Each structure stands twice: as structure tokens, then as C-alpha cells.
Image: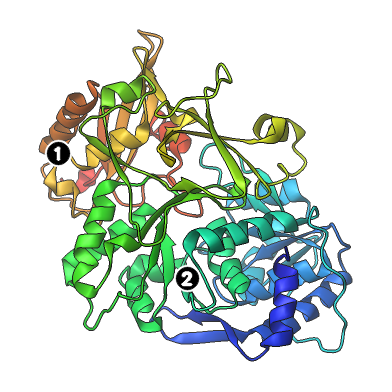
Amino acid sequence: MPGPREVLRRRARETPDRRAYVFLGPDGTEVEALTYGELHARARATALRLAAHASPGDRALLLFAPGLDFLVAFFGCLEAGVIAVPVAPPRRGHVQDATRSIVADAEPAVVLADPTTTAEARDALAPHLPWLLVEGVAEGRPDEGPADPASPAFLQYTSGSTSAPKGVVVTHGNLAANEDMIRRAFGHDGTSTFVGWAPHFHDQGLIGNVLQPLHLGTLAVLMAPSTFIRRPLVWPETVSRFRARTSGGPDFAFAACVAAAARSGLPAGLDLSCWTVAFDGAEPLRPSTLRGFAATFGPAGFDPGALYPCYGLAEATLLVTGSRPGRGPRWLGVDPEALTRGRLEPGTRTIVGSGQVLPGEEVRIVDPDTEHACADGEVGEIRVAGAHVAAGYWRNAAATDATFGGGELRTGDLGALVDGELYVVGRRSDVIVVRGRNHHPGDLETTALGAHPALAPSGPATAVAVGLPDDEGGGERVAVVLEVRDPDLDEAQVVGAVRAAVLREHDLALAAVVLTRPGALPRTSSGKIRRRAARDVHLTHGFPALVPEEVR
């Protein structure tokens, strides 16, 4: 099965003039485009330049603002046999601590960057390394043989939401296996135009929105994450304009579109009848979000059956389970009390399935304490085996053995299988134990967000539930922190409603409910809430008040 290096070579040879990637500016206009022939020629030129500074197996840091130069750099690394290390670009000229940690861990031989990031980060990050631009094209140099499937293609550093970043070693064989799994699971073919805004240094952006279209030989229309964040409806507008079949993102993105449509209405002429795979993954799936999106965009031709819940993680390259195209989400009513005892039993709380186990892999649910396999409906750790499971963590034998040892991936995620559908209920490390009962933060957050009408249209609100030490009982207490956008709401009323809802739904008295401003919760580069960091902020200096004291 060919990997992306060989696929690009074939595309450039057979369809050199076909447009492969288009990049849109903040206003939605096309600012860059690459054909397969152009991408291949520029990637080979980059590989020649790399060869003067790095040998096969060395690492190259990829530090780019959103745009197509990142793609040239990535494929240049593949051509040169150099291991790509994508990282987040500087924010407002500031180099993130996580990026510094990645540089120290990966020990790159060279940095590939654009002029802006070079100016912003070179002196602060790696002044001792050569910094190269991806300029020029190369012709006439013969392609070398295929890449060794077992050799590393790139290092996908984990986001650091639960621990220090670790470099997942993704091989050429991992990429080939997972790209074919995605193709079959999503029902893709050569007409499956993509729209994507996830960052290219993130696994969803790179593997889902860049490499999958290459695998298919179809067009990918890309934009910066900031373009979507500033104007969420540009996402469905672009799907409509380019008649895209596949596009998706985390749950918060679908919720942001619903909130934007509630404020301004649907864009004129919006036609989403083309959107057949709207994948939703990378964070907990909320029934209210999926139902709200289907209801809001149904008048624009969006088919609820296009909603495609899925589950994956960097350690499995990207995709693990997925729905079936056209089926829509699978809902399951469960008993919250039974869930605390590790069982999915019929009840009033709705959870969303994350799809089915796919051909070419094995997914098991295992009791992490006893290592016994769980029966249908029993909650345990999700374990995965298959050719798409990564080779381990870069130069971290202890973490590799703990996560990848024994021939399968220990995901650290908790879930259950019911009639072949995977239901993800939380992370093992995130479980909060109160008086001997397990509480999953995602469930508490869903309850909190639905507790008061003022939280629903707030842009949307964001919640995080964290466990706090209980000095008296020796166990844990729970605090819920909510970012809200409406500074005029009745804080006491909202806090009381959240406390009452959590007590009613989970028989749990919250130790604290904190309302804070948008952007106050710590996030990873891909937008996920960093639970441990949020807990540390709450326990140390606290979150900023919703309304500053001086204006109260």
C-alpha cells in the first residue's frame, strides 16, 4: 500500500496540472493554489536544500503560518527521508513553551519556516540551527525508491492537554494504512472535495484534510483556523461554494456555527445538500450540538444523516472508529447512576456513539485494573491494535512501553461497545472519584451547560469540570468553571441553576461554580481545554471575574 510520498509522485506524473490544494484568505477569496506537479517540483527542491543540512532520519522542525508552504515543507521532508516535526507557529510573536519543549525533545537538525515565523521565532527558539525557506522548484532529478513502511514519516507531538508533549512516531506504513481506513469508512472517492480549517500541524488538519485528499486525488480547500474562529459561517459557506462532500471538526465548531446562525441568520443562497460527510470528533460529542446543527442548517439542505461521529487519536495515526455515511449519529439513553458503576444501562441521559470498529483493526474494551475483557455495555479502557497504530513515542521507552506495550494501544480513554458501536464516556485520567463514585467530566460539563438558558446562546459557553483535593474526606470535590459571553446575566441565578442541575442529575454537590470571561480557560494549540492546567489555575490564583471589580 503506497504512502503519501509515492502517492504524490504518481499524482504529479499522471495528473500534473490538476489542482490539489487551494488556500483561502480571511475574506474567503483564493490566495494560493497548487497543482500536483507544482507541489512535487517544489517539494523536491526543498528536499535538495535539506540534503545540505540534514541526513535521512534527522528531524526538521516545521514552523509555518497557515498556508500552502507548510505542505511543500512536509512533502520535502518525505522526499529527503527527513523526519518532519510540525509545530504551532508563534502567537503574536510569542513562542509557546510547548514548542520549546518539542525542540528540546526532537533535537532537529534544521528548521523549515516562512519569512514571518523566521523573523518572529529564530532568535528566541533555535538561533543555532539553519533556517530554510521553501522557495524554488526542481526538475530532472529522478525519484528514489519507495519509503520503508517502518521508517518514521513525522513526529506528531501530543497536545499536552493531560501531560507534557510526547512525540508520536508515525511511520509511512501507519499513514498508508490509516488513509485507506479513512477512505473506506467515509465512503470517499475521487469526487470527494474537502473543506478544512484545522491547523496543519495538528493530526486532523494534516492527515484528514491534507493527506486524505491526496490519497484520493481530489481537491482540498483550506483556510486558517482564525478565519473560522472570527466568522464561523465561512465554513458552511465554503462547503456550499465548492460543493464539498467532506468537512468536519470538533464539537465546538458545530456549536459555534449554530450560535452564529442564531445571531445573524443563514447566509443567503446557502446550499448544503452536497455535504454528505460532516465528521465530528476530537472532543466529547454533545447530543444538543448535533441536533442543533441539523435543525439549524436543515433549511439550507443539510441532511441529518450526513452527521458523522467518529473517534481517534494521534497514537493511532488518526481514525479508530467511525459512523456509516448517511446513517447519522446513533443515540443511546443511559442511566447516570449506572454509568458511575461502569455500566451503560437504559436511562434518560442521551450519549452519542462514536461509530463502529473498522476493517483492518481490533478494538477491545478492557478493565484496566484486572486486564479482563469487558462485555457489551461494560465501561473499560479502549484498546486498539492494527497497522495504523503508531510505532511509539520518540525516544521515550518508558512511555512507549506503558502505552504501546503488549501489542496494542492503551488509549487511556474509557468507553463501551454496544451492538458494535463505540461509546466514549471519558478519559481514565480525567475520572473524578467522589465518595467512591466515578464521575466523568464530560457528563458534568454537559449538565452544567444545559442548566440555564443564559448559557445556551453565549457564543457558545464552554465548561470544564475538575477534581479538587478533599482535605477532610481524603477523596475529591468537583468545581465547574464556565466561560460565558454575556456579562449582564444574573450570576447568582446561573450559579444556582448549575448547582441544582448537577445535584439533580448526578447526586453531586459542587464545591465551586466559577463564571469567567471568554478565553480564560487554558487551551492547547488545537483548541482543547487543558483540564490539569485549568485545575491548577483554580487552585492557585483563580480565574478572572466575568465582570471586573472596577466596573461592578
Q: Which residue is mark 2?
A: 224
Residue sitting at x 28%, y 54%: 290
Q: Is residue 304 above or below residue 156?
A: below
Q: Is residue 242 left or right of residue 175?
A: left
Q: Is mark 1 in CB contact (under 8 Å) with mark 2? A: no
Vertical side of 347 occupied by 221: above or below: below
Q: Residue at x 17, y 39 (%)?
A: 451
**How busy is the neighbourhood of tag 2: few (under 14 within 10 Å), some, or many (20 plus)?**
some
Left or right for 395, reference 308: right
Given residues 258 and 480, the one toward you in this image is 258
Mark closer to the observer (1, 2): 2
Q: Is residue 423 left or right of residue 93?
A: left
From where the camera sits, is residue 366 visible?
Answer: yes
Whole-percent x, y for residue 276 in the image: 38, 68
Give the quarter of the image for residue 535.
top left
- Crowd tier of the residue under label 1, counting other residues whose Cα lies within 10 Å: few below 14, some 14–19, many 20 or above: some
Q: Kindly identify the amino acid type of the residue bearing the numbered disc 2.
A: Ala
Q: Which residue is mark 1?
A: 494
Q: Earlier in the sequence, mark 1 or mark 2?
A: 2
Question: What residue is shown at x 56% (from left), y 20% (from top)?
Answer: 372
- Position of 546 with respect to 27 (left or right) is left
Amino acid type, label 1: Val
